[in-house]
Amino acid sequence: MLMTSDPALTRIADALDRLSPPPAAIPSFTEADAYVWHTGPDRLEPVRRVARVPLDQLVGIDRARDTLLANTLQFARGHAANNALLWGARGMGKSSLVKAAHAEAVAQGLPLVLVEISRDDLDSVGRLLAILGDSDRRFLLFADDLSFSSDDAQYKSLKAVLDGGLSGRPPNVVLYATSNRRHLMPRDMIDNERATAIHPGEAVEEKVSLSDRFGLWLGFHPCGQDEYFAMIQGYCAAYGLDVAPEVLRAEAIEWQATRGARSGRVAWQFFTDLAGRKGLAL
């Protein structure tokens, strides 16, 4: 019989430890209002200062803002709420809206904790849910910029957060996800399934069923010139930057022309440049 001091057994034991990491300690969730989930080893890292834009500075997305905020507040108050998918044009405030809605709930004294999980760690979501489900706090699980390729099985892990599995989603957790794609999959991938699968209807249904599990869909679309300029004016007002309207508009139009796009992100980038030239610290 081999003794436990045998080097081969030691290596095997070490390998098993790496394959089955010890469970993460359950934090008290008093260090911060936001955390980031990491694996290897599993842990929740507190984020004491979240990079976000105030809710009242999110211009041009009024309907999405009001809908998501209402859903967030009712969940934070212990009421029923839907998982939400924010999809659409890049740079139009999807991620900013999630963080701003969470900040508003916290400002109202509601015990809502924001937990961010990356797409690459979705296969560990079951372990994360086990930790969150044992807490008496309420959690907004945030998956930013989700998308999946044809050979990517990570989307199946996400179903555990929604409606799938025997235990389902803990009642104190709601999921908000953002994506540039309505169905979280590229259009050519869905079309390829229709063209090549033996049962194309079933194949496509499997791919798009994930997005169907979100009870709340909020679309974000490219902004017009007036909305773009209103965003910049809002930033100027919020930070006390006084610039003649005709000068501001001319410079803003020139900036978006050089970028070849208009969006909330482009508006903020222009304002950052303008603030720097005016000697303003953000």
Image (spheres, rainbow, N blue to C red):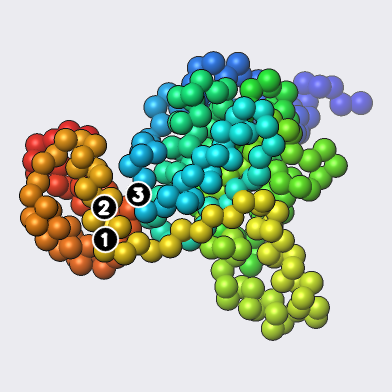
Q: Where is residue 261 shown, x and y percent of the image?
A: 29, 65
Which quadrant is the N terminus positioned in?
top right
Q: Residue at x 48, y 37 (%)?
A: 101
**Label 3's element?**
loop
Which residue is identified by label 2?
A: 230
Image height of 4 relative to 183, above or below = above
Say which residue appears at 73% left-offset and 33% top-offset. 171
Going from N to C along the chain, the mark reached first, 1 or 3, is 3
Q: Quadrant of residue 83?
A: top right
Residue 28 percent across, percent down from the top left: 60, 16
The reply to whether discs 2 and 3 touch (Cβ–Cβ < 8 Å) is: yes
Residue 76 sits in which quadrant? top right
Check disc 2 and report its element: helix, strand or loop: helix
Q: Amino acid at mark 3?
A: Val
Can you identify the residue that label 1 sits on? 226
Dot 2 or dot 3, earlier in sequence:
3
Q: Is residue 147 visible in the rendered structure shown here? A: yes
